[in-house]
Image: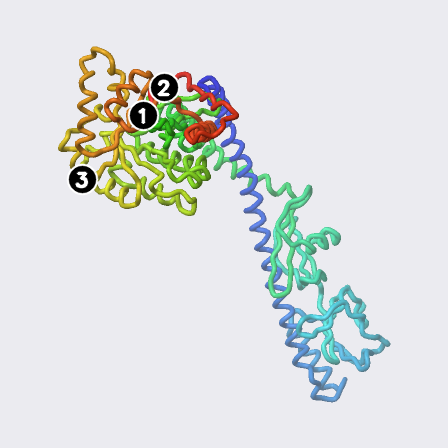
Amino acid sequence: MSRSRIIVVTGLATILCATLPLASMLYFSWKRAVSEEQARLAVYAQRAILRSNISLDEIRSALHALEPLTMQPCSEQHIARMRQLTVNTRSIEEVGYFEQGVLKCTSWGHAEKYATQTPIDFVTADGMQVSLRMMPAVTQGNTMVAFHYGSHNVLTVPSRFADVIVEPGIQLATATDQGYVLGDLNGPDPLLIRDIIANPVNSIDDDNLIATARGSGLIAVALEPRSFLFQRLHRQQLMLLPVGLLIAALMIAVVIWAVRRRLSPLGELSLAVKKREFIVYYQPIIELETGLCIGAEALVRWQRPDGSMVRPDLFIPLAEESGLILPITDQVIAHVVADLRATLAAERHLHIAINLSADDIKTGRALTSVQAALKHTGIEPQQIWLEATERGFMDVDPARITLTKARALGHAVAIDDFGTGYSSLSYLQSLPLDSLKIDKSFIDTIGTDSATSSVTPHIIGMAKTLKLKIVAEGVETQEQADYLSRHEVEFVQGWLYAKAMPAAEFIAYYRHNLARHRGETITTEPPVPVSLGDDPPTSG
């Protein structure tokens, strides 16, 4: 993302940071007001459940006390017993006795009018038959709820099932979990109650705030007008809006800090690692005597989302200094396996050289990453060469341990950019190495009168003394190639042979090179490598 876009985004983010917390606090104050008011209503609903259970327990106990009948039906003793239960039980208004569905007597005396048992609306789990909203045959008073068990029934006022002290304006209703309304308080809309019972959840509609409670096969509903919310909402806003202002200030500060960090080189590099913006280009390694491509060096490239490339010399030092080189190495390993898995599995003599950082060499962590990446791929360990610059060997003992383990696993080990660091003959003798790569800066002196031109043959001689294979980097002229050939350097890489190229182009280049080496008919021209433009003319 360009700096100008970052600035625009920052402006928008600042506006959001200023408005979003305040808007959120307004929203949360509304939600908290609704939640707290519903919690208050739920308490009333729960009390209605408790009151209903008390009434049901009293009714159940009275009916069970009368059944089975142990005295002459409708005798003075029987009527007295029914009257006693009626007077002593708060939830009972009347007790009646039936024979074959016909009322014979009640707690008030013998039935003077012919009355039959009211049709049953539902049966409770413990066998009580319930009739809702029936008219008492004897007293002809208000509608009652009848509970019938055995030969007796009990009448109770519906309000007993919502007999809770509430604030003015609050409505209650209690029903069974099958949807039968037992009683209500303050006259809630029956249709609304029916709909709520069908889906008993706390909610809010255009007119009411709704809370529910469940227990013992019952559902209670409590309602209040939305207008009751405004006082509680005002209290919530007074508490939360200052919090919103504080959060807004903190968020704006974080945005400013993040943008400053994002616009820093380290910030951009960190983001690139997280977004996996690193890709791999492959520079062929050529056997100088035969011209055969025997492998390639994997070179990391930072490709921005807009397609532009960042030169390695601009980010590798920062990555090494910050420790970000470690995840970058992991991404390189993953790309090598994904790009060249099939080719490496088919061509066993082909290898890919992967550069390790000083931290990779010191800790040995990269070996674990390589092992995990190669598992079940068909790629042999010897096809992955590991390269490290002389900086990686400054801590000799940890480096020796890592290199020894790498060779034990089957990897060849090379010292890269030799001559630019701190190595000496005795230093190199103590390390388990397989090859040495001569830095381009020394190859450039071949055929010149430079003061360092005499160093190159000494490096070659040192490598041969140590029985190390030699790879010359940055070969760009035929004169350099001829010189290296005369000095029996085994391998070369550089623009004279090929530039670094994407995986698909390298595979095509390799196949073309292999076909030509085998003397096969070549029907197509080798691919033209894509130049990286800003990259300096080096092998890395």
The disc labelled 2 sits on which kind of residue?
Leu
User: Do the residues bearing badges 1 and 2 touch, measured as CB atoms within 8 Å?
Assistant: yes
The disc labelled 3 sits on which kind of residue?
Asp
Q: Is residue 19 left or right of residue 364?
A: right
Residue 279 appears in the rendering:
no
Please state which of the two labelled residues, at mark 3 or mark 1, is closer to the viewer.
1
**Secondary structure of the residue carrying numbered label 2:** loop
Mark toward the start of the polypeptide (3 vs 1): 3
Q: Residue furthest right?
A: 114
User: In which quarter of the view is residue 390 placed?
Assistant: top left
Task: Read off the residue under disc 3.
Answer: 397
Q: Position of residue 258 (x, y in %)?
A: 40, 27
Quick check: 139 above or below 287?
below
Nearer to the camera, 405 or 133:
405
Mark toward the start of the polypeptide (2 vs 3): 3
Quick check: 176 above or below 486?
below
Task: Read off the residue under disc 2.
Answer: 496
Q: Position of residue 428 (x, y in %)?
A: 18, 33
Q: Position of residue 24 (x, y in %)?
A: 52, 34
